[in-house]
Amino acid sequence: MKTFTIITLFFVTITLSGCGSSSTNIAGLVPAAGTVTLNGQPLADAGITFVPTELSRRAAGAKTDAAGKFTVSTLNPSDGIAPGEYRVVISKQDEKPAATLRQTKTEIKTPSGKVLPDPHKNRRLFKDGKPIPAGSVAETVRTETLGKYAQADTSGLTVTIPPKGDKQLTLTLTLP
């Protein structure tokens, strides 16, 4: 019985040691943070992807705050990035309503003279005036606003993260 209890406690201990925080850390990550500007102004709410030039490293990412500032994450929030060279992709999407509400004052009169409300009042229309089909999910249109910076092959942005990290990265974008 004593042996059974010890074996049971051993397996329970092993099993429970895997429970708790599911957070995984990656060895060798260093802190990285900085600022993104567009035409000299802080760029808010932009997504940043750091694409490694060597396949042995993981990609990392960040999102800018209202002041254009960001902190890089690889697997967990603000856990950093592996040292090395990266191509940088920055994207920002604007969401605009895909449709407007059609406001009409038209009334429909039946042959008997009864007045009925316009069945098309408040009907959702695309910006070109065409009606959105019933049950459609076309609520918003997302548009990429940073052009060439949204692609690794065309952004022209690169950073080298030193072995101790860099908390003063500056990414400067210029668009017409």
Image (cartoon, helix red, strand yellow):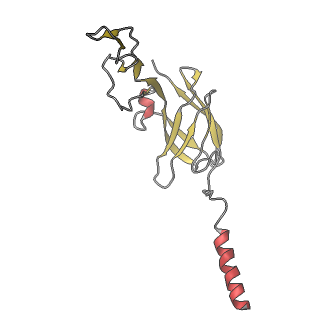
- x and y percent of residue 1 in the render? 71, 92
Above or below 68: residue 76: below
Extreme residue in the front direction: 112
- The residue most toward the left is 111
Q: Nearer the viewer, residue 164 or 117?
A: 117
27 relative position to 135: left or right: right
In the picture, which quadrant includes the C terminus?
top left
In the rendered structure, the answer to whether residue 9 lies left or right of residue 131 reads right
Q: Position of residue 76 (x, y in %)?
A: 61, 50
Which residue is rendered at x = 65% and y = 45% of the image? Answer: 31
Q: How many marks?
A: 0
Question: Camera-side residue: 90 or 159?
Answer: 90
Give residue 123's quadrant in the image: top left
Looking at the image, which residue sits at the far right?
Answer: 2
State the residue at coordinates (60%, 42%).
Answer: 72
**Where is residue 63, by image quadrant?**
top right
Q: Is residue 169 left or right of residue 175?
A: right
> Dividing the picture into quarters, in which one does residue 139 lie?
top left
Name the side, left or right, on which 7 lies relative to 95. Answer: right
Residue 54, compared with residue 134, is above or below; it is below
Query: In percent of the image, x 63 and y 56: which residue is there?
Result: 23
Residue under the point 36% across and 20% down: 125
The answer to whether 5 is drawn above or below residue 34 in the figure is below
- Residue 66: image x %, image y %? 62, 27
Q: Position of residue 70 (x, y in %)?
A: 61, 35
